[in-house]
Amino acid sequence: MTRLLLCVALLGGCVVDVPDPPDETPAPTPGPTALEPFPSPAPPGARFPELVATPGGGVVLTWMRGTEDGAALEAAVLEGDAFGAARTIVEHPDLMVNWADGGSVAIAATHWTAWWLQRAPGGYHAYVARSDDGEAWSDGVRLHDHDGRGEHGFVVALPDDDGATVFAWLDGRAWADDATPDETMLLTRSMDAAGTLGPETALDERGCDCCPTSGTVTDDGAVLAYRDRTVDEVRDMAVVTHDGEGWSEPVVPVEDGWTIDGCPVNGPSIVSNGPSTLLTWLTAADDQPRVQAVRLNADGAADGPAFIVASGRSVIGRVDSLLRDDGGALITWVARDGSDSLLRARWLLPDDTLGDPFDVSPLPPGSGTGTPRILDTPEGILVAWTAPTDPATVELGLIR
C-alpha cells in the first residue's frame, strides 16, 4: 500500500506516491572476520599473553618469560601502529609460569597494578605491586595474609581512578589444614593509593579450585565471575556484584547443572560497556560441551535466555569476549580440529542474533597455547595467543 501526498505548487498540484516505512529494522551489519598478522614485541620464549586496555583507548600487551634467573613478567605499550620496547615489571627466581594462571597488569587513569605468582613450600602465593606510570614499580607484596601451604592465585585486579585497587583471588589455604575440608575460597581485599592492603573478605567459601576468574567494572559497580562448586559437585558459573557499599551474595545467572568431580580448568569471561554486561563460559552439562553467553542485569541475574555460541564434541572452551557500545559482542573459543586445535569466533549482534562462526587461526594441540585473548582497538580487534614452538612465541593478529 502507499499513501497519497498532495503537493501544491504555484501553477497547480501534483500527486506523489510515497512508500510505507519498512515493517522491520534492517539486520545489523556483521562484524569483520579476516585476520591480518601484526608484529609482536615479545622476545623468543614469551608465553601466555594478556591484552589490557588503558583509559585513553591505548593497549598494553603483557606476557610471561623464563629467564636465566627464573622468570619475568614483561609488557609493551602500543605506540601508534606498533608496540614499543619490552619492559620488565618483575623478575624473580620463584616466579611461576603457568598456562592457566599467571600474571598481568590492570590500568586506571591514576596508576597501574601488577600481579604474579611465586612458588612457595607446599604451593604458591600471589603478589601485587603498583606503579604511577607503568615503568617504575613498587616492591611486590603478598596479596593474602596466609603465608602457609596452599595455592593462592587466579587474581582479578580492578583499579579505581582514585588510586585504589580491588583484588579478588582463589585461596586454597584450607587444603593445608587436615581438619578442614579441601575447599577453595573466593576472597577479596583492596589496596589504597599508598599501597596499604585492607582486610580480607570471603565472597564464597567454596569455589572451583583452578578455573580462572574474571572481573569488570560497570556503571553500577564491580562485577566478578567465577566457577562455583556446590557440595554435590555442581560447577556452574556464579557472579558477585558490588554496589559501592558492599558485595552481594553469589548469583548463578544460568543453572546448567554441570556436575563434575574435578576442576575443568575453564573459566568465564565477563565484559562490560557502560551499563551492559556479558558473561561467556564453557559448560558440559548433560554431556554436551558448549560455549554459552548471557547478558546480565545490574544484580548479576540473567537478562534474558543464554545464547548457545558453539556446541559439540570439538568444543574445548578457554573463552574470551569483547563488548561494543552498540551491544554487539565478539566471542572466541578454542576447538579441536582433528589432531590439532583451532581458535574460532562468532559475533553476537546488537539485536541478539548470532553471526556465522568463523576460524581465526589454527593452533597446535594441548594447553600450551594458553587462553587466546582479544581486545577492541581503533585499528581493529587485536588477537594474542601463544605459539608453543621451541622457544615459544607470542603471536598477534588484527581482525578488521
Image: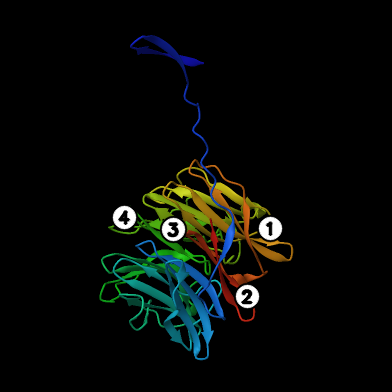
Image position of 74 (left or right of 30): left
Which residue, given by chain and number where applicable, does mark 2 sit on? 388
Crowdedness near tag 4: few (<14), some (14–19) or many (≥20) residues, C-alpha within 10 Å = some
Residue at (50, 26) in percent of width and height: 23
Residue under pointer 4: 243
Question: As shown in the figure, which amino acid type bears the numbered disc 3?
Answer: Pro
Give the CA distance from mark 3 to mark 2: 29 Å
Q: Tell me which label, 2 or 1, sits earlier in the chain.
A: 1
Q: Amino acid at mark 2?
A: Pro
Do tag 2 and tag 1 residues touch (Cβ < 8 Å)? no
Amino acid under disc 1 = Ser
Q: Secondary structure at mark 1?
A: loop
Query: What residue is shown with label 3?
Result: 378
Q: Nearer the viewer, residue 131 or 41?
A: 41
Q: Residue at x 60, y 78 (%)?
A: 392
SS label for mark 4 = loop
Residue 351 placement (x, y as % from top left): 49, 40
Type of amino acid at the residue the image marks with label 4: Asp
Q: Position of residue 117 (x, y in %)?
A: 46, 79
How far across and down, in percent of the image, does residue 130 sit? Answer: 33, 76
Residue 56 horizontal side relative to residue 214, left or right = left
Q: Nearer the viewer, residue 390 or 97?
A: 390
